[in-house]
Amino acid sequence: MQAVQYRTLGCAPEVAAVPTPEPGPGQVLLKVTAAGACHSDIGLMSLPAERFRFPLPMTLGHEAAGTVAALGDGVAGLAEGDAVVVYAPWGCGGCRQCASGQENYCPHSARLGISPPGVGAPGAMAEYLLVDDSRHLVPLGELDPVATVSFTDAALTPYHAIKRSLPKLVPGSTAVVIGAGGLGHVAVQLLRALTAAQVVALDVTEEKLALAREVGAHEAVLSDGNAARRIRELTGGLGAEAVFDFVGASPTAAIAAQSVAIAGDIAMVGIAGGVLPVGIGAVPYGVSAVAPYWGTLPELHEVMELARAGAVHIHTETYGIDEAPLAYARLHAGKVNGRAVVLPHD
């Protein structure tokens, strides 16, 4: 089969021929209908040798939709042809976090060598994907896999971050979304669907700000040295009850600290390496800051219900598998407006 692989440290991904996997006991083989490209893939491929801990070559892609192609021994509740999406932050399945559906916070996965597909385990940028356990599959039903595949990360990750702050996002409150790209433009829609808060989106490009307005942002502000002052103006000087930083760089962390309200929330979701100082004088009194990771399995089911209700839409660009390196190049250059989706069989 054809697969998109990161083969050499510091080099662009390549399309290569690899063996088609076969499911073992408890495993499920999917025929991949759509695979999403993500900025975290770029972050992974940008790691220096001393920080890269995965074997190469590695098939990329942690956002996956597909149909069941074959079942390993002992798998029940699925049939060949079933359409599904994949919950990718796999855990051990037996600890307290995993038992509550929080496999994204499994404390044992690293020690046991359990990795998400595309982030250690062979990923979805291939014609077929081997899934370790049927519990990691969520029914797709009649939803379009191309339009929905990125819900497994680009919607699940912001949903997980936003859900924690819902009690503070009451009528009259303000939520700030820093970065209106693949995750941020979904966060804007989630905030509009789930809260009555004023939603303010920040980005460095007018194109992304236009997308933020299109999907429902009440205000779209250039992310520059005046951004925090502008947010204060929009909130009567009080600041925002919740700030979601989908960039995670030092300048955006500074904006978050300067624009959050007393007793507000800051979620550092982006992986650009910025650090948010927390302490007396660094942020307003009572501020709570978190670095959330992905989302839970129950939350993915909830996100899929939002998709069925038509409450959220992910802007996508599609590519054939031979064009996947181009998709990653465009993503790295900031030229993808929304999410890039690869169609391995088209």
Image (spheres, rainbow, N blue to C red):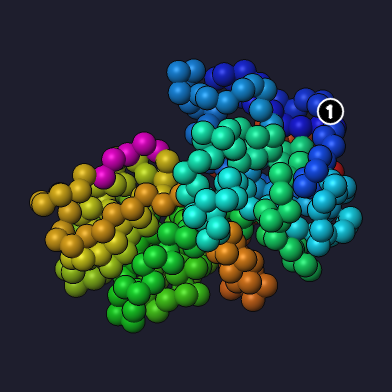
Q: Quadrant of the N terminus?
A: top right
Residue 148 included in the magenta stretch of the image: no
The residue carrying pointer 1 sits among few (fewer than 14), some (14 to 19) or many (20 or more) residues within 10 Å by Cα, namely: few
> What residue appears at the point 76 percent right and 32 percent down from the top-left corner?
3
Which residue is at the front of the view, 233 or 288? 288
Identify the image quadrant of residue 301: bottom right
Give the position of the C terminus as an image quadrant.
top right
Q: Is residue 273 magenta?
A: yes
- Tell me which residue sits at (71%, 44%) in the image: 132
Instruction: Decide if residue 127 is on the left or right side of residue 53.
Output: right
- The boundaries of the magenta stretch are 272-276
Secondary structure beneath label 1: loop
From the top left corner, tell me how far across and down residue 163 is, in percent. Answer: 43, 67
Magenta segment main secondary structure? loop
Q: Which percent across, then down, holds residue 85?
A: 71, 56
Where is residue 36 shown, x and y percent of the image? 65, 46
Instruction: Give x and y (percent) for residue 49.
Output: 49, 18
Q: Is residue 33 above or below residue 110?
A: below
Q: Residue at x 18, y 62 (%)?
A: 286
Query: Of residues 101 and 309, which is closer to you in this image?
Result: 101
Q: Quickly name the residue at label 1.
A: 19
Three-letter residue code for mark 1 = Pro
Labels in figure, total: 1
Name above or below for residue 200 compared with residue 335: below
